[in-house]
Amino acid sequence: MNVPSAPSAPSPSSALSASFTAANVERFSGFAETYDRHRPSPPEALPALLCQYAGIASASDARPALVVDLGSGTGLSTRLWSGHADHVIGIEPNPEMRAQAARETTAPTIEYREGHSAATGLPDASADIVMVAQALHWMEPTSTFAEVARILRPGGVFAAVDNDWPPLISPQIDQQFYESRRRERTLVETGDYEREIRSWAKPGHLGRMEKSGQFSMVREFFLHKQDSGDAARMIGLVLSQGGTQTLLKAGMSEDDIGLTGYRAALDTLFGGVARAWWWTFRVRIGVR
């Protein structure tokens, strides 16, 4: 299936969107491979659940004609749909992230296009499912939900997926992670390094979806998955955070950021072995 591009009317919030998109996009430059290697993909149960909720599960061979993954990044969430949809399009504004996604994707049904959440370039009512994984907090809500509603067909489903940080491993590893994140935020805020970045708090996603008036109903639920990792992967997760990368780009060393001590503490806590990681994913859905 080939879904052509189609011009769409400018969103009322397009001027606001343009004002912060460049800074938000640039925040994720320079570490696409690290991001893809260490971040979790969404739970494997998600495609079947969303298909059923969108009314596509009545036959064993029923599949959505088109799934759109907004802010698809390195394709972790896009590749989840391999074998579950006729066509999957990842929309991603960052060229380094798109290039990494293309390198990691072999399924012929998946493609990546330049665009952003308020301007996908896709036809009206063309998508059965639109999702955004770990990225909705970087997207201006009014213009994003208007675009989602435009490209979803009636009865289609929008899903915003976010994983909780950190995965459950042990209280001591949790504490080290929280301390690392607090140190990073303090340094970023003290240096005012992200003054041009815009974000919207994740706990408000569901309320903003409902307030938008674009969905006939909204609700929230939780999914879980297990994978594993060692101290090196935990450091990789920290290095996959935009705030950490902002500090490194500003010229700070790993000693300045506190990563040297964090590595030593994690090496002790993990003891040189991988451990089970338990992830919780919060899913907010809206039905068109």
Image (spheres, helix red, strand yellow):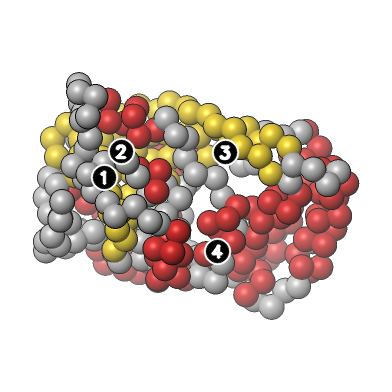
What's the residue at 44%, 34% (across, down)?
44
Expressed as whole percent of the image width and height from the top left, the position of residue 136 reads 40, 49
The disc placed on residue 84 is: 2
Say whether residue 168 is visible: yes
**Please, what secondary structure does the residue beneath circle 3 have?**
loop
| Mark pair 2, 3: CA separation | 25 Å
* Residue occupied by mark 1: 67
Q: Is residue 203 left or right of residue 60?
A: right
Expressed as whole percent of the image width and height from the top left, the position of residue 94 reads 41, 67
Label 1–label 2 contact, CB within 8 A: yes
- Whichever of callouts 3 and 1 sits on the residue coming sooner in the sequence is 1
- Whichever of callouts 4 and 1 sits on the residue coming sooner in the sequence is 4
Residue 262 image-quadrant placement: bottom right
| Mark pair 4, 1: CA separation | 24 Å
* Residue occupied by mark 3: 164
* Residue occupied by mark 4: 33
Foreground pick, 101 / 142: 101
**Please, what secondary structure does the residue beneath circle 4 have?**
helix
Q: Residues within 10 Å of mark 2 (few under 14, many from 20)?
A: many
| Mark pair 4, 2: CA separation | 25 Å
Taking the view exactly as shown, the residue that stands out farthest to the bottom is 251
- Which amino acid type corresponds to the residue marked 3 in the rendered image? Asp
Residue 55 image-quadrant placement: top left
- Whichever of callouts 4 and 2 sits on the residue coming sooner in the sequence is 4
Q: Is residue 157 left or right of residue 139?
A: left
- Which amino acid type corresponds to the residue marked 1 in the rendered image? Val
| Mark pair 1, 2: CA separation | 9 Å
